Image (cartoon, helix red, strand yellow):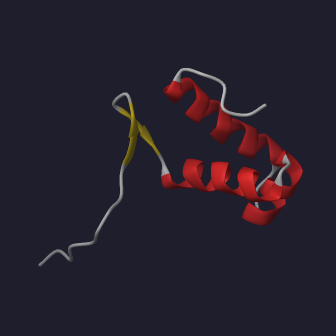
Amino acid sequence: MTEARPRVLFLSDGQEITHRQMEALAALNSKGSMKGAATALGISTPVLHKYVREVEEKAGESLIV
């Protein structure tokens, strides 16, 4: 029998926003910088930029100033 697991799904105009992308935005909010957020998440700054860019494309607007 397959084990059932709960899943939270974030959508923006029908586009799925992944859990990792949401973590990236939350880390940016709490750390206040790309470098600080990337360090907190244990990823490189270019990967963090990629996550943010993907969310911005899905949202259809810039989210980070």
- In the picture, the quarter occupied by the C terminus is top right
Q: Is residue 55 left or right of residue 53?
A: left
Q: Is residue 56 above or below residue 38?
A: above
Name, please, the residue furthest toward the left.
1
Task: Please provide percent x and percent y for residue 55.
Answer: 57, 35
Name, please, the residue furthest toward the top.
60
Task: Please provide percent x and percent y for residue 7.
Answer: 32, 62
Q: Residue 7 or 30: which is nearer the viewer?
A: 30
Q: Is residue 65 above or below residue 39?
A: above
Q: Is residue 34 above or below residue 2?
A: above
- In the picture, the quarter occupied by the N terminus is bottom left
Task: Please provide percent x and percent y for residue 37.
Answer: 79, 55
Q: Quadrant of residue 27?
A: bottom right
Residue drawn 51% across and 27% down?
Answer: 59
Residue drawn 81% across and 51% down?
Answer: 44
Residue drawn 73% across and 52% down?
Answer: 29
Residue drawn 64% across and 41% down?
Answer: 51
Q: Quadrant of residue 14?
A: top left
Q: Is residue 6 left or right of residue 64?
A: left
Q: Quadrant of residue 64?
A: top right
Q: Is residue 65 left or right of residue 1?
A: right
Give the total of numbered labels: 0
Q: Residue 13 or 35: which is nearer the viewer?
A: 13
